[in-house]
Amino acid sequence: MLREFNISSELWREYDLPGREKPYRIDNPSKLFLRTGGTTHRVVDGDNIVHCIPAPGVMGCVLRWMSRYPEKPVDF
Protein backbone atom coordinates (compact mmCIF):
# COMPACT_ATOMS: atom_id res chain seq x y z
CA MET A 1 0.00 0.00 0.00
CA LEU A 2 1.35 3.41 -1.00
CA ARG A 3 1.05 6.11 1.68
CA GLU A 4 1.21 9.84 0.92
CA PHE A 5 2.65 12.50 3.26
CA ASN A 6 2.67 16.28 2.93
CA ILE A 7 6.29 17.49 3.27
CA SER A 8 5.76 21.03 1.99
CA SER A 9 7.09 22.28 5.34
CA GLU A 10 10.59 21.33 4.12
CA LEU A 11 12.77 23.84 2.24
CA TRP A 12 14.93 21.07 0.83
CA ARG A 13 16.05 17.52 1.44
CA GLU A 14 19.37 15.90 0.57
CA TYR A 15 20.43 12.31 0.15
CA ASP A 16 23.96 11.05 0.59
CA LEU A 17 24.42 8.04 -1.65
CA PRO A 18 27.52 5.85 -1.88
CA GLY A 19 29.53 6.58 -5.01
CA ARG A 20 28.15 10.11 -5.41
CA GLU A 21 30.55 12.94 -4.77
CA LYS A 22 27.81 15.46 -3.93
CA PRO A 23 24.49 14.93 -2.16
CA TYR A 24 21.37 14.52 -4.28
CA ARG A 25 19.27 17.57 -3.40
CA ILE A 26 15.55 18.17 -3.90
CA ASP A 27 14.40 21.78 -3.45
CA ASN A 28 10.85 22.61 -2.33
CA PRO A 29 9.63 19.04 -1.82
CA SER A 30 5.86 18.83 -1.52
CA LYS A 31 4.84 15.17 -1.24
CA LEU A 32 6.44 11.95 -0.07
CA PHE A 33 5.16 8.52 -1.10
CA LEU A 34 6.16 5.44 0.92
CA ARG A 35 5.34 1.78 0.48
CA THR A 36 5.58 -0.50 3.52
CA GLY A 37 8.58 -2.77 3.07
CA GLY A 38 9.74 -0.85 -0.02
CA THR A 39 13.39 -0.15 -0.79
CA THR A 40 12.64 3.16 -2.52
CA HIS A 41 10.40 6.15 -1.93
CA ARG A 42 9.16 8.93 -4.16
CA VAL A 43 9.35 12.66 -3.62
CA VAL A 44 7.41 15.22 -5.67
CA ASP A 45 9.07 18.63 -5.84
CA GLY A 46 7.64 22.12 -6.37
CA ASP A 47 7.85 21.68 -10.16
CA ASN A 48 5.87 18.39 -9.97
CA ILE A 49 8.95 16.36 -10.86
CA VAL A 50 8.95 12.94 -9.18
CA HIS A 51 12.24 11.66 -7.75
CA CYS A 52 12.62 7.94 -6.95
CA ILE A 53 15.25 7.57 -4.22
CA PRO A 54 16.54 4.60 -2.21
CA ALA A 55 14.87 4.55 1.18
CA PRO A 56 17.09 5.86 4.02
CA GLY A 57 19.28 3.02 5.22
CA VAL A 58 19.00 1.12 1.92
CA MET A 59 22.26 0.94 -0.04
CA GLY A 60 23.87 3.31 2.50
CA CYS A 61 21.41 6.16 1.77
CA VAL A 62 21.37 8.93 4.39
CA LEU A 63 18.69 11.65 4.43
CA ARG A 64 18.72 15.17 5.88
CA TRP A 65 16.37 18.13 5.45
CA MET A 66 15.79 21.75 6.40
CA SER A 67 12.39 22.72 7.73
CA ARG A 68 10.75 26.02 6.83
CA TYR A 69 9.76 26.23 10.50
CA PRO A 70 12.74 25.84 12.87
CA GLU A 71 10.40 25.51 15.87
CA LYS A 72 8.89 22.36 14.27
CA PRO A 73 11.70 20.52 12.44
CA VAL A 74 9.66 17.30 12.00
CA ASP A 75 6.11 17.58 10.72
CA PHE A 76 4.89 13.97 10.84
Image (spheres, rainbow, N blue to C red):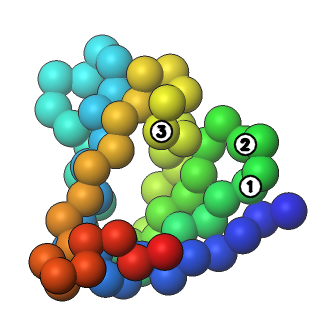
Which residue is at 50% across, 21% downward?
59
* Residue in view at x 25 percent, y 59 percent: 65
User: Residue lying farthest top?
Assistant: 19
Mark 2 touching mark 1, by CB under 8 A?
yes
The residue under label 2 is: 38
In the rendered image, which quarter contains the N terminus?
bottom right
Q: Amino acid at mark 1?
A: Arg
Q: Position of residue 72 (x, y in %)?
A: 26, 80
Q: Is residue 23 above or below residue 10?
A: above
Q: Of 59 and 24, which appears nearest the observer?
A: 59
The kind of secondary structure element at disc 2 is loop
Q: Dot 1: few (<14), some (14–19), or many (≥20) neighbours within 10 Å?
A: some
Q: Which residue is mark 1?
A: 35
Which mark, residue 19?
none
Q: How many marks?
A: 3
Name the residue carrying label 3. Answer: 56
Which badge, 3 or 1, is on the more N-terminal residue? 1
Residue type marked 2: Gly
